[in-house]
Image (spheres, grey):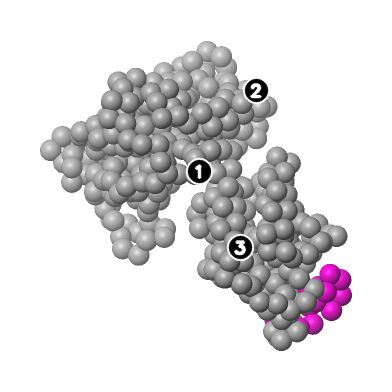
């Protein structure tokens, strides 16, 4: 038997897996449905969904297995997460990786295995959708297609769950989130439900007037991305009870959302204590880069108003950093016909997030892509050329913070 290797991105992969909360009961119900359908369609006695932790394999749903976890070193899925595509072992006794594996020589006596790697929003392989048999076999072309299709659908489901979990921290209730995602109609009401809580009424009217179809899919567009995050919020949330934390966040988001909508920004995500804002999608607003910087400055001024309210209530005050970047992103409807959202995808989001991570309290940093567009309107405090995580070439970052009393 050959133990599976440890991926190079193991730390990031494990953090990603932890944030997905795959063991939640409502997710298990959906996983059970996938496993049942897969085992019937391909006619295998064993099918399961697993995730790979640092030392063990967790089985989140299965048929044909009588255990809920096993050692990572003896798991088939530990090898599967190293793949970009299907891992197929037509006869385990002919594969040196598994020839004396406990699950081969003992119950359930696996002789055939196929696994599809499941990946997160960040592209980290966190587990696998698997089928197995007690006798060697080859998959027919239609069976391969079914396994791949179910694997891709499950991956998208896991990613949508992540998006839903992030939104659920702020939205008033799960019921409201379900209505927001499910009531997708080709009408003005559809757009109001999807976009109404995330953009100003004037921008919403533009979307409705120029609305495109509700089909899945997207387009590449040059947009501006603003990422804000509270400094030191994790310790705050640990030191205060949930009621206090929610009260602080509600006061903060009420002020920030009003400011963002004033500058025609589209709130694409509320990420716990942070906000992801898009300027220039779903509709072109003109001067997106300049509006984003003006919006960021207004947000920092607005935070002072927030802190005055918090001080009156004897609640902890907040500090915020903001990073902004422009570039091409894929924008459009992602998900399925039954459950979709307007999303944005691309490395320029990551750049904005990396820039934001470099900020200190009350600071606004922008990329050179932003500065090139606003150099005639905004005078920066200073600039620095630096490398950011995940990107080889250094970039120039400009500080466009205001001097606030």
Helix, strand or loop under label 3:
helix
Residue visible at 72% across and 58% down? 40
Distance in Å between CA atoms under marks 1 and 2: 35 Å
Q: Is residue 331 left or right of residue 294?
A: right
Q: Are marks 1 and 2 in contact (CB under 8 Å)?
A: no
- Is 190 one of the magenta-colored residues? no
Q: For residue 243, which numbered disc appears in the image?
A: 2
Front of the two marks 2 and 3: 3
Q: Is residue 279 left or right of residue 371?
A: right
- Provide residue 106's location: percent of width, then percent of height: 87, 75
Q: Residue furthest left?
A: 376
Residue visible at 15% across and 34% down?
Answer: 377
Say which residue appears at 51% left-offset and 28% top-offset: 183
User: At which x and y percent is residue 305?
Assistant: 41, 18
Residue under pointer 3: 147
Secondary structure category for the residue under label 2: helix
Q: Is residue 160 left or right of residue 50?
A: left
- In magenta, the rendered stretch is 97-110
| Earlier residue among tags 1 and 2 | 2
Check the image and name the residue furthest to the top.
312
Say whether marks 2 and 3 touch (CB < 8 Å).
no
Using the image, determine if residue 79 lies above or below residue 42.
Answer: below
Secondary structure of the residue carrying tag 1 is loop
Rendered position, 302 above or below 332: above
Return the disc, 2 or 3, that comes first in the chain's sequence: 3
Please identify the quadrant where the N terminus is shown. Answer: bottom right
Which is more foreground, mark 1 or mark 2?
1
CB-based contact (under 8 Å), mark 1 and mark 3 = no
């Amino acid at each position: 038997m050959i133990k599976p290797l440890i991926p190079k991105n193991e730390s990031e992969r494990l953090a990603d897996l932890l944030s997905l909360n795959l063991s939640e009961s409502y997710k298990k119900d959906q996983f059970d449905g996938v496993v049942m359908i897969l085992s019937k369609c391909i006619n295998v006695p064993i099918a399961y969904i697993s995730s790979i932790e640092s030392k063990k394999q967790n089985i989140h749903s299965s048929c044909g297995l009588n255990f809920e976890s096993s050692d990572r070193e003896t798991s088939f899925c530990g090898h599967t997460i190293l793949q970009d595509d299907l891992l197929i072992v037509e006869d385990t006794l002919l594969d040196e990786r598994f020839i004396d594996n406990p699950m081969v020589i003992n119950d359930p006596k696996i002789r055939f295995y196929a696994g599809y790697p499941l990946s997160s929003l960040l592209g980290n392989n966190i587990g696998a959708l698997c089928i197995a048999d007690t006798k060697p076999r080859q998959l027919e072309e239609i069976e391969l297609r079914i396994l791949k299709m179910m694997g891709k659908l499950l991956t998208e489901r896991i990613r949508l769950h992540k998006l839903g979990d992030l939104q659920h921290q702020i939205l008033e209730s799960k019921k409201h989130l379900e209505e927001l995602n499910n009531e997708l109609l080709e009408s003005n009401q559809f757009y109001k439900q999807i976009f109404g809580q995330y953009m100003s009424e004037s921008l919403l009217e533009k979307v409705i007037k120029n609305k495109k179809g509700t089909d899945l899919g997207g387009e590449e567009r040059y947009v501006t991305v603003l990422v804000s995050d509270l400094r030191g919020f994790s310790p705050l949330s640990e030191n205060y009870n949930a009621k206090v934390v929610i009260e602080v966040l509600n006061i903060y988001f009420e002020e920030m959302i009003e400011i963002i909508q004033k500058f025609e920004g589209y709130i694409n995500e509320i990420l716990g204590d942070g906000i992801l804002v898009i300027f220039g999608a779903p509709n072109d607003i003109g001067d997106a880069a300049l509006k984003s910087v003006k919006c960021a400055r207004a947000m920092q001024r607005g935070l002072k108003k927030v802190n005055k309210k918090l001080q009156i209530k004897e609640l902890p005050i907040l500090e915020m950093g903001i990073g902004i970047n422009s570039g091409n992103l894929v924008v459009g409807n992602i998900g399925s016909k039954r459950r979709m959202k307007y999303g944005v995808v691309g490395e320029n989001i990551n750049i904005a997030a990396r820039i934001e991570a470099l900020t200190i309290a009350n600071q606004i940093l922008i990329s050179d892509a932003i500065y090139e567009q606003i150099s005639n309107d905004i005078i920066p405090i200073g600039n620095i050329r630096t490398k950011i995580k995940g990107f080889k070439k250094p970039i120039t970052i400009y500080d466009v913070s205001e001097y606030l009393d």
